[in-house]
Image: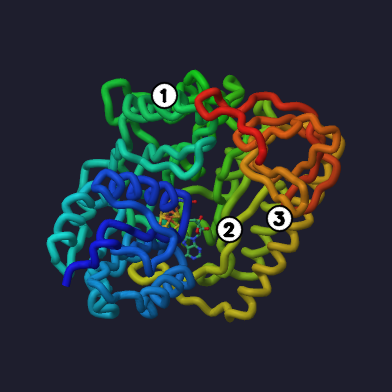
Amino acid sequence: MAASDSIAKTYYLETFGCQMNVHDSEKVRGTLAARGYSQVEDPEAAGLVLYNTCSIRDKAEQKVLQRVATFKYQPNGRKFGILGCVAQHNGEALFESAPHVNLVCGSASYNQLPHLLERLENGENRVTGLSLDTDETFDQPQVERSSPHSAYITIIEGCDKNCSYCVVPFTRGPERSRSSESVMEEARRIAANGTGEITLLGQTVNSYRDPSGAGWSFARLLDEVGRVDGVRRVRFTTSHPRDFTPDIVEAIDGNPALCDWVHLPVQSGSSRVLAGMRRTYTRDEYLRVIEAIKAAKRDIVLSTDIIVGFPGETQRDFEETLSLVEQVDYAQMFSFKYSPRRGTDSVEMADPVPEAEKSRRLQVLQELQRRLQLRRNQSWIGRDDEVLVEGRREKFDQWHGHTAQNRVLNFSDPLGVAGASDLRGAYCKVRITAAGPNSLIGELVSIERKPSAALGLRVLQ
Ligand code: SAH
Ligand code: SF4
Ligand code: F3S
């Protein structure tokens, strides 16, 4: 039976996982819009329901599978699709475990989506896009972006690093870089539309290799994006320590549009564990990269990811992680308990550390990080920083946004500097008056740049 006419070309899309997935969903929305679909906020009102999924840890995958299993809205021929990393990792097995699934498509096959959608529209019930052997990147001109002020650009897809614990090489396929020309063209288009902040994305963003004749390095690309007219901030994530070359630090030093924040996951402070993880660097090599970043003229802040309880991690290994965290003094950390993933090499490794001990280590690490963040954030009290305003919390009479160094900053306007203006999209100078471990609080000093003319500075209703 075909979907009832009123919902046939409507879709509901829910996104799980990392920024690459968030941006992929923007591309999927663009593809759907180009085929005449409109988005709805309620799955019951949608003819096509899509989950863009994450399988990085077992918990993430279980959450998705449970949502898939309990998906009940399927009268009227409504179609149901699983996109992203769980789709790629579980493949056609999803049809067996959840017979109401109609589409299974991984991110490496999104360029096939128009064709796959057509097959669904023609009444097919089991459609897949699971090929990983693609040389093409998903260069999607019809991206439907969620924010007018901040935009993602994927510059490299996939990952070749093969860390022993990680599913990403299976779920996103081999590394494929976009040509510098196509990245620049997108950056110019975004900036001309009034968006001042651009984040360059890739699982190993700094492993970028320009496939075109121009042969730009990652550092060159970063610098050139920062020089595009109208671009005020450039971020990039995630960097791999092995490919973090000195020219990236030089580019940040030489171009104020490049944010003074680097996300450089270390995963562990123990060289023994790093070898088991196949991270391709030792503790000392990582710390040398950190030294080079700290020797920059600008004060570049660092953030990281850490896995505790990797198979065989001893108390001593864990203490090396604690000492590294203290030494680097990260501004932010994402820490996780090791999760064994099907198909990865580390599932075969002996893992004698009890679950309760892993939880204890995670807690100790997070407590240390909390202390370091509080100390760091409190050192900002009395100083001024610039924030890109993202929204407003009416209840607290406060605006909020991120600083260039990626800190969350909430601020009020006691002197009425902004009047009745809607500050969303403005870059504001704010004096910091208080600090917690996860955010800063401040007062508006001045508006440095209003939302671009293309977007207009609106008046609050
Ligand atoms: N490409 C990035 C990050 C990829 S995934 C990098 O190499 O750093 C984001 C984070 O999830 C990783 O940095 C790691 O800390 C965590 N992660 C990945 N696989 C994991 C696993 N099997 N168990 C626990 N954490 C994991
Ligand atoms: Fe996974 Fe390692 Fe690739 Fe990061 S670099 S995505 S952790 S395989
Ligand atoms: Fe998750 Fe896939 Fe990103 S596994 S973290 S959504 S690359």
Q: Earlier in the sequence, mark 3 or mark 1?
A: 1
Q: Compute the Cα span from label 3 to label 2.
A: 13 Å
Seen at 33% across and 24% down, the residue is 181
Q: Are marks 1 and 2 in contact (CB under 8 Å)?
A: no
Q: Which residue is labeled 1 in the image?
A: 188
Q: In the displayed structure, would residue 86 be above or below residue 295?
A: below
Label 3, on which residue?
Answer: 323
- Any atom of ligand 3 within 8 Å of the CB at mark 1? no
Disc 1 to disc 2, C-alpha distance: 35 Å
User: Picture coordinates of residue 50 (x, y %)?
Assistant: 34, 62
Q: For numbered disc 3, what is the local secondary structure?
A: helix
Q: Is residue 180 above or below residue 413?
A: above
Report the amino acid beneath label 1: Arg
**C-alpha gap between disc 3 and disc 1:** 43 Å
Dot 3, how many residues are within 10 Å of its Cα: few (below 14), some (14-19), or many (20+)? Answer: few
Rate crowding at label 1 as few (under 14), some (14 to 19) or many (20 or more) other CA atoms within 10 Å.
Answer: some
Report the front residue among 4 and 451. 4
Figure quadrant of the N terminus: bottom left
Q: Looking at the picture, which amino acid does disc 2 mark?
A: Ile
**Of residues 390 and 252, which is closer to you in this image?**
390
* Residue 435 as seen in the image, left or right of residue 355: right
Dot 2 alpha-carbon crowd within 10 angstroms: few under 14, some 14 to 19, many 20 or more: many
Picture quadrant of ligand 3:
bottom left
Instruction: State if disc 1 and disc 3 touch (CB < 8 Å).
Output: no
* Mark 2 lies within 8 Å of ligand 1 (Cβ measured): yes
Q: Position of residue 295 (x, y in %)?
A: 67, 30
Where does residue 207 sit, x and y in percent of width and height?
41, 39
Amino acid at pointer 3: Ser
Residue at the image point whose x is 65% and y is 24% from the top: 449
Residue that badge 2 annotates: 306
Residue that appears at 80% across and 37% down:
413
